[in-house]
Amino acid sequence: MSDALLGAPATTPTQSYAGASPWALARRRLVRNKVAMAMVVVLAVIVVLCLAAPFYAEHIAHTDPFSSNLDGTTVVNGETVPVMQPEEEGLGLGVTPIGPTWDPAHYFLGADNQGRDVAARLLYGGRNSLLIGVSAALLTCLFGTLIGLAAGFFGGAVDAVLSRLLDVDWAFPVYLFAICLSTVLLTNSLKIGPYTLEAGSLVLPIVIIGIVYIPYVGRSVRGEVLSLRQREFMEAAVGLGASSWRLLWSELLPNVLTTVIVLLPLMVALAMLTEAALSFLSIGVQPPDASWGTIILDGQGLLYTRPAVALAPGIAIAVTVLALNVLGDGVRDALDPRAKHRTGG
Amino acid sequence: MSRVPRIVVVGALVALVAAATGYAGSAAPRERETSAATQAHRGGTLKLLAKSAGGTLDPQVNYTLQYWQLYQAAYDGLLAFTKAGGDAAFTVVPDIAEALPTPSNGGKTWVFKIRKGIKFSNGKEVTPADVVASFQRIFKVKSPTSGSFYAGIVGADACLKKPATCTLKGGVTANNAARTVTINLVAPDPEFKYKLAVPHASIVPASSPPSDAGTKPVPGTGAYYFASYNPNKQLVMKRNPYFKEWSKLAQPDGYVDQITQSFGLTTEAQITAIQNGQADWTLEQPPADRLSELGTKYADQVHVETLTAFWYVPMNTNLPPFNNLKARQAVNYAIDRNAAVKIFGGPRLATPSCQVLPPGFPGNKPYCPYTKNPGTKWSAPDMAKAKRLVKESGTAGQKVAVVTPDDEVNKAMGVYLQSVLNQLGYKATVKPISQNISFTYVQNTKNKVQINTQQWYQDYPAASDFLYVLFGCESFHPGSDSSINIAGFCDKKINAQMHKALELGTRDEDAANALWAKIDRQVTDKAPMATLFTPKHIDFVSKRVGNFTFSKQFYWLVAKSWVQ
């Protein structure tokens, strides 16, 4: 194994690391990073809350967040009031959804333009946003690692072809492509061999986002492999007659894994932001389902009267992305402490 | 609503004409006062806003309310809708023609005497030859209504086949000496007078280009002319220097010296600009989240007017599940019209409805079978009955896609419909499609649209403009983008009655309207659509705009307002 993982910071007592594996050392460093741990807690709370969405909707808010409730009523301060409130002053124009009541049982964050509970939709939306974000990031990391490994290790024509492919992917206008694809899917399903892709399929945003960010990971891994290829342990392995497959699988992959692990939370954050943007453009999650992006879209028409509808998912995205970024930095510091010193962190 | 007896209308018209032209001798001092007031308000620039330009400026090609509204002050036809507020706007009066003729030859021949002294904005006087050339031009420029409104003119068949060489031989002829133009129809058409009063029948110089003039203004005879047009920036109208008012009812002189319409601002920004006095009016309807603010803080600058229009949900009668009458009726029973009204902006902006013809429209007799207590008025949805009908139809569980334009209100309406359809047991999805293509998309049967959201605003005040146009067999053209019978509804018995009503209209308008009322009920019972509501229209104007006059036919009459 490379010594990249073995370098311990000079400030740490050497005896405490005796016999510990590099992974255990990294875990210890991560656990000692209070800010990173706080972000783990934040992320855990978000995930648990989102997983609890059906429970909240059914047993606490007693609402169906996927059905319109334009003529419904709710209770505020013991008084029954309409969810969609017609203006009664002046010319009596317009109907405004109920605002935040701060009562978890009755429209905690208010209603959207269909009279649906924003809090319940926020939790359900989080499930979709997290699912898409994590799945797309895993896809990105998987293919980015494979392509980076192959390009860096084999070099020559393989590297040239794969690098150019990454260049094309890098330069691809993702939103334009997504809009075109969604237009096709809205009018007709897309048939790829035996598979039929429908407009509302979550596979679509996952695949689009997953593919688009492959160069982020692929280029980093390729650079890492080019550097590792010159190291002594690689020469030793070659000298011992290791096959290409063994060199890739046993020598290079474990060494680039740290880079990929550092990139994973950052990719999740990036994927979630892109998902929000795509959903805002009506691509991916389709009504009545929700994602944080679609809820922002729903709230766009209510910015003057009910800003909470757009703000709530906006804040949820911001907090989640911040937590993932800080956690990513923490993981980097834990796996490669020297990087912290290099960056002055 | 019962129609006003014709004699009362004629009497009121005579009085109005007398007042307008100052024939009543005793009215002289008041006329001087009016004239002084007119002079005091004369001048200034009326600044209008729109999100984007409305396309070609050619009055014989453009088919948008955006420019039809402006054409009222710039172009004239042989006849015109009265430039007045309320229902009076539905009355047709002579314009370029001296009088509204009574057709002869069994309703097939119309002879118009052309007024003397009317000049185009290029200084040339209108002649019978210009009138003939204008009718030929309708076909040469392939006006969107050439195949419908004017297809009944003798010779139109040949013009539709070969527009470039259109002569309308035997259809439209001029007698220069007598200053008359004769129009011969293939068959009597009780609605022909309306068709002559819309902008596509504008009289333009014979020298006008025989193709769509695009952004190049075509001279007209109105109080204003189009001075410049840049679709990316602005449209400017100025006073026609050759205009002399000949009929206050047909073409009144305007107050402002200049009218501009600027493009590019978002609706939100336009509303703010008007609030700040930087603009005078917006073409767009205010966004939902600004309505409350406008209705309370700017109530004296808001004008809310009932329209002769309806919002409806066409259901494809040739595709499952809506090729089943019970499935269509189920949707009608299930839709909560109050919910739809709320999406549109609340009870002050729309009235729930079940039928095709809007209230107060010729042939309208209130009728609503799809409500908890069937009768004349919608009261509440009947979900139990709706679910029973779906069960009986055997269509539960089928996939249904709701197609909507992608603007805020239509999309919200689509999501609401999806919710209703899911409650009925269908597997519904919403497909929001760009506003630019959605109208033609839903018309083409190749796109297999099952259900969608639509609006229809009258072209002219006749029941056929709703019932025959939207649900007549002749309006259904499979495979075409121009098949306005979106539901693909064709009931031979009902269609025969429509033809009978059209024919009856040439002889007895009241009897025809009674028959249209019957047809309205029959179409409603067959449920090729679910009517949602009758909408109202909001005009938000700046503080300085005075004398706001709303015509039910062409909406705000810009020339009748002043800014100082």
Image (cartoon, coloured by chain):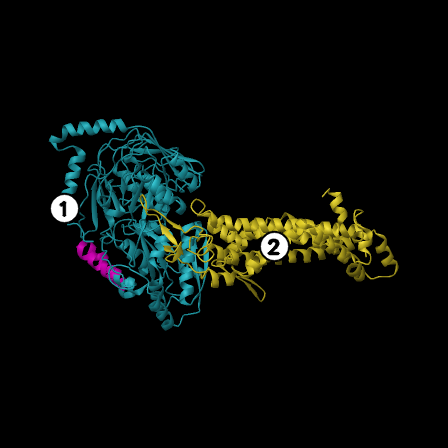
Q: Residue at x 64, y 55 (%)?
A: A137
Whole-Å distance between the Cαs marked 1 and 2?
Answer: 76 Å
Is B248 on the left-hand or right-hand side of A84?
A: left
* Region of the chain picked out in magenta, as a range: B494-520
Q: Are marks 1 and 2 in contact (CB under 8 Å)?
A: no
Q: Residue B470, how many percent across, how many down?
A: 32, 57
What colour denotes chain B?
cyan
Mark sitting on residue B8: 1
Q: Residue at x 33, y 56 (%)?
A: B338
Q: Residue furthest front?
A: A78
SS type, badge 1 = helix
Q: Residue A60, how many percent across, how many down?
A: 47, 61
Q: Residue A41, how many percent across, how many down?
A: 62, 54
Q: Residue type at mark 2? A: Leu
SS type, badge 2 = helix
Disc 1 sits on a residue from what chain? B
* B501 part of magenta stretch: yes
Q: Is residue B503 above or below residue B208?
A: below
Mark sitting on residue B51: none
Q: Which residue, given by chain and number where applicable, does mark 2 sit on?
A: A43
Rate crowding at label 1 as few (under 14), some (14 to 19) or many (20 or more) other CA atoms within 10 Å: few
| Front in this rendered view, residue B115 or A5 | A5
Magenta: main secondary structure = helix
Asked if residue B261 shows in the view, the reply is no
| Front in this rendered view, residue B355 or A140 | A140
Q: Name the quadrant containing residue A201.
A: bottom right
Q: Residue type at mark 1? A: Val
